[in-house]
Amino acid sequence: YRKGLKRDGNTPAWISAYGSYGISAYTPAFAGRTLALIDAGFIVGYANVRGGGEYGRDWHKAGQLANKPNTWRDLIDVCEELCARKYTSRARLAIGGRSAGGITVGRAMTERPELFAAVIDGVGWSNPLRYVAEQNGYGEEPEWGAISEPAGYRALKEIDSYQAVRDGVAYPAVLLTTGVTDPRVGPFHVAKMTARLQAASGSRKPILLRVDFDAGHGVGSTRAQQDREAADTYAFLLWQTGVKAYQPS
């Protein structure tokens, strides 16, 4: 965040998380696009949640298989602490995750919808109970569980955000993104999640799906494609966290 931050709970914040495969997804690095949000007055943060590799193998195992709920509950704890310390507030707090990070933010949102103003779910796993329909589905069994086994089925159902959506709940604003040619996480995940949230949410906040018909999981996207997605994402964040200059006139 910018120098001179006032801890009065009125600063918009965007906290990203991943927490899978023992990967340290958000190691410190210069990200030029992120400066645009910081210049607009945002706090930008990254939560090192269990399931990632930031603190070794035990940290990964503590967010794997039946322990996976620790991953999104760590994110919830981080966000609650930021609000308690008045860095931000629920009305100005957004979370984001990509790919397996979609499980993290999706389940944080469905478990604590009142905690967040906005959620960004990029090419995320929303319906992992259906992972067997994907070309790499069975390769995920060591991380999520085997659907053919009772314990594995229970673990998969617990991490399934689509299954966790409830009718009439006031969900936050959500932007979901996908690439039509994604071989890693099929577009059906966020497509189903978008439709379910639009039908179920009682908040009247926008639930939007952004589709890039010439993109996949993001690894091979051009710089222009990445810039366009970032612009749409940041505009949504600025709008839904109440930044005055980005509200409809």
Image (tube, helix red, strand yellow):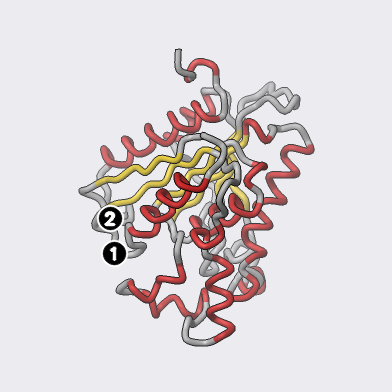
At numbered mark 1, what does the secondary structure look like: helix, strand or loop? loop
Residue extending furthest right?
Answer: 84
* Identity, as a three-letter code, of the amino acid under mark 2: Gly
Which circle marks residue 169 in the picture?
none
Earlier sequence position, callout 2 versus callout 1: 1
| Tag 1: amino acid | Pro
Indicate the position of residue 66 as horizontal and vertical percent values: 63, 75
Quadrant the C terminus occupies: top left
| Residue beneath the point at 69% across and 33% down | 89
Residue 246, x across and y down, in percent: 47, 20
| 130 horizontally vs 117: left or right | left
Q: In which quarter of the image is the N terminus?
A: top right
Position of residue 98 relative to residue 208, above or below, is: below
Badge 1 local density, few (<14 within 10 Å), some, or many (20+)? few
Residue of label 2: 216
**Quadrant in which residue 114 is drawn:** top right
Q: Where is residue 187 in the image (x, y as percent from the top left)?
A: 32, 57
x 33%, y 62%: residue: 186
8 to the left or right of 174 = right
Q: Is residue 6 left or right of residue 97?
A: right
Q: How far from the left and from the top, in percent, is residue 100? A: 47, 61
- Element type at marker 2? loop
- The residue pinned by badge 1 equals 183
Asked whether the residues under the numbered discs 2 and 1 touch, taking CB atoms below 8 Å apart as contact, a structural biologist would say: yes
Residue drawn at (50%, 32%) of the image:
237
